[in-house]
Image: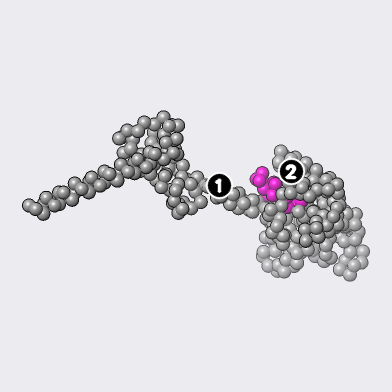
Amino acid sequence: MKKMNDFLQSKTLNQRNLRDRYQQIAQKVLNDQDVKSFIQKNGLKITDTFLDKNLSKLYEYVNQRDKQSKIIPGYKPKLIISDHDIEVVYEPSEDTLVKQKAAMLRKRVEMISMPKTLRKASISDYELKDVDGRSEALVEALSFIDEYSKNPENFHKGLYLYGNFGVGKTYLCGAIANELAGLNHKSLLLHFPSFAIEMKGLIGKDTLLETLNRVKQVEILMIDDIGASSLSSWVRDEILGVILEYRMQNELTTFFTSNFSMDLLEKQHLALDNRGESNNEVKAARLMQRIKYLSKPVMITGDNLRLNND
């Protein structure tokens, strides 16, 4: 009989402890400022029935909000009303939203042999560096972004940015691409001399055609540093020529950067053969017609920003 009494007393004690623990949890949860605000905002009444149905959800919210290790890392709990009951949903934190936005922008701005710093290029930073020699390019860039975002289905000429080394031609292209990425438009930037070498390395491989198609078909193409190195007839005709022909026929926006004006690019670069002799004038003129159709020349002058940043 004594053992039975001990058992009953221990069971009663356990039940009392459970009740006390339940009351402590309920008190802690109901005194939480966020919970109090939520209950007040939604006009809820605290009753035994309310606590039986919703205390576990309120406790989950408070517990997960204050924990360092979340149920879903990078997400924060939020209380909502669903079918007259309280539910906990998880929303991305501010840090997670920043990371998600950065990942989205990376997907929309593809780069081939371009500086990683272009990922952070922005129109506002370019504007801060602006001097008279770069003001026209900035105005043209802003105008393009505005017009393209309003009517992306229409054909819009890109910009042919030319000028001396380090005046911000490549940076401005990166800034335009990043701005458009935030508006759900995809760009591909490629350093053409490096791209030409890469394509030569793919001769005889299936990936050559795949890479060429990816470049020529992208929504917005930015060809950087055209004219910086000599072109073989194969690169000029089978790579650059094919890309420009496709983009002209399909009216796809294309940008260029170069140290040459359009006239000098044609005469001192595209018309020269591997020996530096000018015997490709017809082919050069044909390529130049496509470049002029696809882009608008804008000269950039000013100090060498690369040297100034050293």
Magenta stretch bounds:
172-186
- Residue placed under numbered mark 2 in the picture: 145
| First along the sequence among labels 1 and 2 | 1
Q: Residues within 10 Å of mark 2 (few under 14, many from 20)?
A: some
Q: Which residue is tagged 1?
A: 94
- Secondary structure under the numbered disc 2 in the rendered image: helix
Where's residue 254, x and y in %? 77, 50
Check the image and name the residue furthest to the left.
1
Q: Is residue 185 magenta?
A: yes
* Residue 11 rendering spot, x and y as whole percentages: 18, 49
Q: Is residue 61 left or right of residue 197?
A: left
Q: Residue at x 89, y 64 (%)?
A: 272
Q: Residue at x 45, y 32 (%)?
A: 41
- Callout 1: helix, strand or loop? helix
Nearer-the-camera pick, 101 or 263:
101
Q: Residues within 10 Å of mark 1 (few under 14, many from 20)?
A: few
Please tell me which residue is depicted at 87% across the width and 61% down the height of the picture. Answer: 269
Which colour scheme appears in the figure? one colour
> What's the magenta bit mostly, secondary-structure-wise?
helix
The residue drawn where x is 41% and y is 34% is 39
Left or right position of 266 against 60 = right
Residue type pointed to by label 2: Ile
